[in-house]
Amino acid sequence: MELIGKDSRCIAVTPPINVNARDRHIFPPSIKTKLAEQRVLRLSDVTAVGRGPLRQHDDYLAESFVAPNHMDIWKQKGGHYRAALERQIGRSRTIDSPVVWITDNWSCGYFHWICDALPRLELALQHYPANELTLVLPYKFRRHGYFLESLKAFGLKETRILNRFEKLTCRDFILPCHLAGTGSHDPEMIGRLRDRFGRFFGALAGRPSGHLARRSSSRVYVSRAIATRRRIANEQDILPILKRHGFHRVVAENMTWEEQIATMLSTEFLISNHGSGLANMFAMRPGSSVLEIRERYETGQGCFWGLASAAQLDYYYMLADKDDASKSAHWSDVRVDPSELKRTIEMMVSSKQKVAA
């Protein structure tokens, strides 16, 4: 059985507020994102395993992979041979109640969990009651606590993380399909996600025993100082500028996941360099502003620009040079021009002040 929401369509990506002519190769005008048909499949007798793709009637399901060519690459590397061997090792179980599956081979990354997997869950919940569904996750989702933390807001019947060699035959299997290519975003589902967490954290913070440490600052700088890559090499040079403009410095790794999202719900101006922490902008109120610091010559980092557009946020950017020219933009730290950062912050903040006046 197949349920269909909206048809496939193209949506315009809102240009950066501060885009200039020399950066048009990074931010092409009139760029559009193609969204897939909102499809939810209901299948029978699907086998989910702790490691490896989904199978039905001895065929692997393409939705197990972030893109069609990933299955081909997986097979070329002998993944299907390893999967066949592990099927012989694993213990087999059967579940008759409805199971929902939302992950692919990239979903364990934070950005992909927030921006690809959770919107698929939102899509499924447009058609099926959450309290009747068991969400099943692969073995590797034991790595980080935020997976289960972020699922509290959905009211699912159960979340079950498979053991490494476990095989689970699902008699009633609900599979929401990908909404867009990774790095692109369905505004409807991003909006639903933001509203869901806004309601959940609002209710949680209102309890007498509420434990969320909401930040009072509406201006937040997310530092990657303790990340292993893509840090700001001269962060000490820009902290005084950020402080003078009222920005509160946070380090996501030192916060609980709930504190991170609660912070974003009250943030009006967000600054950070390119990295997964920017995915939390989905929780910001429409009309808020985001400044992304990007490596100067990397043209393929449009995922947060697209997310800002889908979340109805004003997107600003600033280009920075690699600190180590021998490394790729994916791995190198960057060095920020303090004076340029100051000008960009003033532009971002003043534009809101003019609207308010």
Image (cartoon, rainbow, N blue to C red):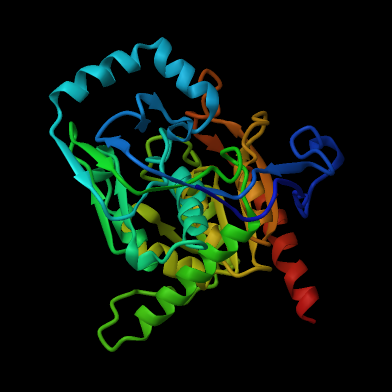
Q: Is residue 322 above or below residue 156?
A: above
Of the pair 334 and 47, the residue shown nearer to us: 47
Q: From where the camera sits, is residue 241 visible?
A: no
Image check: 341 left or right of 264?
right
Please tell me in which quadrant of the rendered image residue 300 appears.
top right
Across and down, in percent, residue 182 comes to 56, 39
Location of the C terminus (image quadrant): bottom right
Asked if residue 250 is positioned above or below residue 175 in the image, the reply reads below
Asked where in the image residue 159 lies, by quadrant, the reply is bottom left
The residue drawn where x is 33% and y is 17% is 80
Residue 245 position within the rendered picture, expressed as x and y whole percent measured from the top left: 60, 66
Q: Position of residue 121 (x, y in %)?
A: 45, 55
Q: Tell which of 187 and 316 is nearer to you.
A: 187
Near-viewer residue (15 or 125): 125
Quadrant in which residue 302 is drawn: top right
- Toward the bottom, the furthest residue is 208
Q: Is residue 257 above or below residue 276?
A: below
Please tell me how many numbered marks the rendered image carries: 0
Q: Measuring 37% from the left and 32% from the top, which residue is drawn there?
A: 56
Residue at the image position 38 percent from the left and 46 percent from the top: 101
Q: Please, is residue 229 above or below residue 345 in the view?
A: above
> Looking at the image, which residue is at 86% across and 39% down?
21
Q: Position of residue 211 (x, y in %)?
A: 28, 77
Visible residue check, residue 284: yes
Residue that protrudes farthest toward the right in the picture: 21
